[in-house]
Image (cartoon, rainbow, N blue to C red):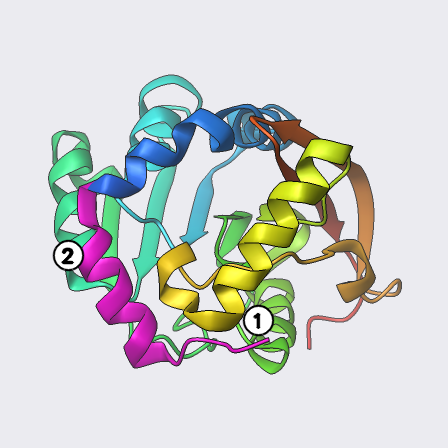
Amino acid sequence: MPILTHAQARACYDRIGAWQDTQRFYEGPPVRDMVLQGGFEDAGSVLEFGCGTGRLAESLLKGRLGENARYIGLDVSPTMVGLARARVARFGDRARVLLTDGAPELPFEAGSFDRFLSAYVLDLLSPSDIRAVLAETHRVLTEGGRMAVVSFTHGATRTARLVEGVWTRVHAWRPALVGGCRPLELRPLLGDERWRVVHNVVLTSFGISSEVLVADRFGPGT
């Protein structure tokens, strides 16, 4: 299936802007499950890969993270970075949002965070970028740190399979119309020696299936 380049993804999400929040009708239940299983109440440092409008960051900072926890969000879209910065500005030094060039390398030292999260981002990356992001996630997490991700996945019900069929045809024709996202299976992408899966479920909401994956880091740091 065609994959958006980093520049195309930036242009796509600059156009989408605040409209991204309208997707909460199907993203809401899987994202809530990811947050519930992510153990963010005990987090001291959180990195979000692809923070979008900052809606999830605001929710975490307001209701899940402790007062001393710090949050850093990354995004390739200047429009999204502007929206997210405005959304978390009231949290002061606890929250930072950084613009990236879309490369999978994370600009942080090893062991900098104890939580990593990403919602509906891996499913728009190329296979090589996904592998690189997972390797980088393992590197920047502390020993025993936790990764929590959610992705569009293959339909788990008859209705979801019909939706998937339409979605993939649109994606094959013009991937930007569906934000570049395509069905993805997360669990097979993990190396057994590097992660311990603690939660993995497929949830279907409004005919769209999403995979939630939560895993703890262990093994060598590189």
- Please give the count of numbered marks on the rendered protein: 2
The reply, left or right, for residue 4 in relation to residue 35 is left
**Residue indicated by mark 1:** 136
- Residues rendered magenta in the picture: 1-18
- Pointer 2 residue: 79
Identify the secondary structure beneath mark 2.
helix
Magenta residue check for 69: no
Looking at the picture, does residue 37 appear above or below residue 170? Answer: above
Left/right of residue 41 with respect to residue 8 in the rendered view: right
Q: Position of residue 156 (x, y in %)?
A: 77, 37
Q: Nearer the viewer, residue 101 or 21?
A: 21
Q: Earlier in the sequence, mark 1 or mark 2?
A: 2
Is 16 one of the magenta-colored residues? yes
User: Residue at point 88% right, 65% down?
Assistant: 193
Q: Is residue 25 visible?
A: yes
Q: Is residue 104 above or below residue 185?
A: below
Tag in front: 1 or 2:
2
Q: CA distance from mark 1 to mark 2?
A: 25 Å
